Each structure stands twice: as structure tokens, then as C-alpha cells.
Image (cartoon, coloured by chain):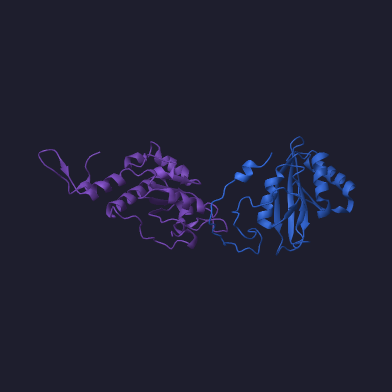
Amino acid sequence: MTRNDTERHDALVLETRSRFGDKLLSVDRSYGDCALIVDLGVVHDVLAFLKNARRFDLLMDITGIDCTNLPAHRERFELSYNLYSVPDDLRVRVETAVPELEMNVPTAIDLWKSANWAEREAFEMFGFNFVGHPCLKRLLTHHEFNGFPLRKDYPLMAGQWCSVTSDLSDELNEPR
Amino acid sequence: MGIDQTLLPATKDETGIITTRLDEIVRWGRKNSLWPLPFGTACCAIEFMGAVSSKFDISRFGAELVRFSPRQADLVLVAGTINYKLAPVLKRIYDQMADPKYVISMGACACSGGFYDNYATVQGIDQIVPVDVFIPGCPPRPEAILHAIMKLQERIDTEPVTSRGRPRRHEVVEKFKDN
């Protein structure tokens, strides 16, 4: 963390608030990190703003959170985008709540190509439906696998035997 | 390589011709030329590299010719974590090996899943293929691999040369049973 991270995060929060108003629901600042909690409806706009106007050119990861049994949460699931700006050496997190019955989230592949596999992982582990994703299928688990293993209602040690070998030929042949 | 204990009862008469039993000479050949296929998926495979290299030198036991084709190997050394996605691959590689074939399960992960008790990790490869020798440890030292090779040699020494399948020590899951 560089010295003026806090000030730059302050400026980022102000600018995001001026652009998105109430849709920026809250800001979580702890341990030098900055998380923008936004409404699901504007998550793609916020990401596009951060990428294009604020030079966050690297999507580090997309992770899901199953909030079951957590003390305070709006919806069952949360989605977290970890962004990094190489030119500014600054990190920011974008979080949004996703309802269990309507897990549609706009894809971020048009902004970062690395969103492709990150979204596939979030899909297979939690069941998020990334609308507009060209190939939303399982990435790490076997294609015969049923269920979403990182959901808290998935039995912790329930392995599933697979009958055929699987390869990455689809991934190797996909257009770049 | 001299004539060792396994070639007894071998007799040598004044013509210089050695006579022995066919079983004995076949066993002697098998146990001293195990060609291992390293099925390495994790840190255990690094220890196997140590066992192959000069310091420990697995060739002292005739098992230095590492093959990466199952068709050319008769010992598959499973070194590392095996997950459910990989299980059919291991089974297929085992099936592609020609008889007689042997399996060594190396390390806590291959033997029992190790500390990965979750949705992804197979809890012991003996559910997929029949295992001859288990090596405990995380990871085991190269000496343990040499010990396992010697144990396997003892086993080859005692089993009938015509045996094609050993009795399975544990029940293999339904999906991986032979027809």
C-alpha cells in the first residue's frame, strides 16, 4: 500500500457517488482496502467506469460469497470483483448482492477478457448466471458434476465419481 | 548382476550351464526391472525425482527406467493428490498398462486424500485401482520410496508368475469395476 492510497480511494468514492448516486449503496473501508457496494442493476456500469475512466485495467478475480448464516446481509449471495490498476498501483473491490432466485449478472467479458474463466468458476461454484457469457460451463469441476460445491448447503465432503475422462479441447479451440 | 537368492535352487555343473526353475527366472527378471510410470500430481513427485537422482539412485533396485507411456511401464507410482476429475484418467492409464502391472500409492493424499477431505479429492486411490504398496508421509522421503520398491520386490518374489490380478484389498467403487 502506498502512502496516498487512502486519499486516492477517497477521490474514487466521491467520483463514483457523483456518477451513480444512490446506486452506490455503501462503502467499506478497512485495513487500507476500499470496497464499493453497488446495486446489481448498475454493476456493469460501475465496472465500465472503473475500467475506462479510472484505468483499472486488470481484473484480478471474481468471487462469490454465500451469506447464509452471516449476521447481516441483504441477499443470500454476494459477488465480488477485485480490480487492480497497473498505471496507478491501486486496488479496489466492487461488491453486489445477488438474490438466490434470480442470479442473473451481466458478464464483464466485454471489459476484461480474463472475466471469461473467472465467471465460469463463479458459475460452477455458486451458480451465478452471467448473462452474455459465450461459454458458461464448468471450468474446474468435471462436466458430470452436479450442484454448486461452494454453496453452504452443498454437503462438505460429497465427492462425485465421474465415468469418463475430460479434456480442455473446447478451451484450446475457442476463438481468441 | 550376480545370481541372488531368488535364483536358488539354481545349480551349476561342470559344463558351466545353470539350471533353475522357469518361475524363479521370470520373477527374478520382473522384480529387477520394474519400469515406473510416475503419475505425479503434487509435491510427492518432487521426492520421486530425488529418489531417481544420483543421491538415492533408484537404479540400484533396477527401477530407474522412467517411462511416460503406460504401454512401456509395469509400475505406476501415484505420487500426489488425485481428485474426482482425475480419477477416470488414472483408471484409463492403469488399464492401458500390460500385465503384469503394479501400483504404488505414494503419500498421504494418494493413500487417503490426506488433509483434503472435501468435494474434490478422492479419499484413497484404492477405490480406483488395486494398490500393492502404500507409502505414508507428507511427502515421504526418498528412502521410503526405495523401501516400497523393496517391499514390492518381495511381493513379486512370492506371488505365482501366472497371476494376473491380485485380490483387491478394498472394494473398488462401482464405476471403476472391471467388466
All told, the count of numbered labels is 0
Q: Residue furthest left?
A: B14
Q: Residue furthest front?
A: B179
Q: In this rendering, would A60 be left or right of A26?
A: left
Among the chains pictured, the one given blue colouring is A
> Eyeballing the image, is A126 above or below A171?
below
Q: In this rendering, would A145 be left or right of A102?
A: left
> Eyeballing the image, is B123 above or below A112?
below
Residue at left 33%, top 41%? B62
Q: In this rendering, would A138 be left or right of A20?
A: left
Where is residue B176 drawn, in percent x and y?
Answer: 47, 58
Q: Chain B: what color?
A: purple
Residue at left 68%, top 50%? A120
Quadrant in which the C terminus of chain B appears: bottom left
Q: In this rendering, would B145 be left or right of A99?
A: left
Q: Nearer the viewer, residue A124 or A29?
A: A124
Quadrant in which the N terminus of chain B appears: top left
Camera sees residue A47: yes
> Eyeballing the image, is B17 above or below B127?
above
Where is residue B11 drawn, in percent x and y?
Answer: 14, 45
Q: Nearer the viewer, residue A44 or B150?
A: A44
Where is residue A134 drawn, in percent x and y?
Answer: 72, 47
Residue at left 22%, top 40%? B2
Camera sees residue A25: no
Where is residue A20 drawn, in percent x and y?
Answer: 88, 49
